[in-house]
Image (tube, helix red, strand yellow):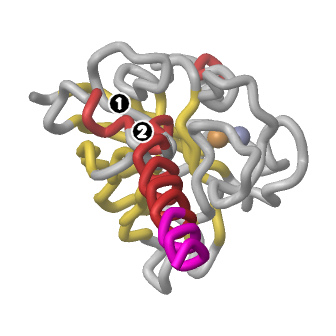
Amino acid sequence: MRIGTALATFAAIAFAATIAGCATKPPAAPAEAPGALSTADSAQANLAAASGSLVSGRVTLRPMGNGVHLTGTVGGFLPNSTHAIHVHEKGDCSAADASSAGPHFNPTGSAHGRASAPAHHAGDMDNVVAGNDGTVPLDIHLAGVTLGGGAANDIADRALVVHAGADDYTSQPAGNSGARVACGVIKVVQ
Ligand SMILES: [Cu+2]
Ligand SMILES: [Zn+2]
């Protein structure tokens, strides 16, 4: 009888500890869910050719889930070519080679890397591949950033840049992706 009581008590304590463990567990990585901090409903980036390329496009950006979703079309590439695309720090595409856009958007001081890797810039995205017609239908989810609101990870008024080559996801500080062939400032629409 006393043993049974002790076991029951032990089980009750273990159960309570389990409940307490769940209750004190932090909500899944707050830094991964900044979408709620976005104040804009949508933004637009009109990409204009840079570095003498023929690349241009139009991209719509909307807060979604834990980040911002990009949709649109970029064209003027060679058929079936692969290209790096990133958010760069400065919303300034005025230089002929788009160098005015500065480095990759990197508010956390991380190394450059693939978006799916633990270490990467907030502006790092996977390469895009042009079709036979030289266009890319964009459909990219950029996690960990916000749109509008002025948080450290806000990509409004920064630049969306496309490169001549592919991002190798390894080379520092920018994946060895070559010239900047198109650039557009991310402008909040509403
Ligand atoms: Cu870039
Ligand atoms: Zn980067």
Question: Tag 1: Cα neighbours inside 10 Å, few (<14), some, or many (≥20)?
Answer: many
Tell me if I can see residue 49 in this picture: no
Q: Which residue lies under the disc numbered 2? A: 48
Residue type indicated by callout 2: Ala
Marks 2/1: CA–CA distance: 12 Å
- Residue 25: percent from the left, percent from the top? 50, 45
Q: Residue at x 33, y 61 (%)?
A: 73
First in sequence, mark 2 or 1: give its number. 2
For residue 186, the mark is: 1
Helix, strand, or loop for circle 2? strand
Q: Residue furthest front?
A: 1
Q: Residue at x 84, y 48 (%)?
A: 176
Image quarter where the C terminus lies is top left
Q: Quadrant of residue 107?
A: top right
Viewer-nearest residue: 46 or 133: 46
Residue type indicated by callout 1: Ile
**Looking at the image, residue 179 lies above or below residue 71:** above
For the magenta stretch, what is the residue range? 1-9
* Main secondary structure along the magenta-highlighted residues: helix
- Residue 188: percent from the left, percent from the top? 22, 26
Tell me, yes or no, whether the highlighted magenta stretch contains residue 6. yes
Q: Residue furthest top?
A: 150
Classify residue 4 as left or right of residue 173: left
Q: Quadrant of residue 95?
A: top right
Viewer-nearest residue: 63 or 103: 63
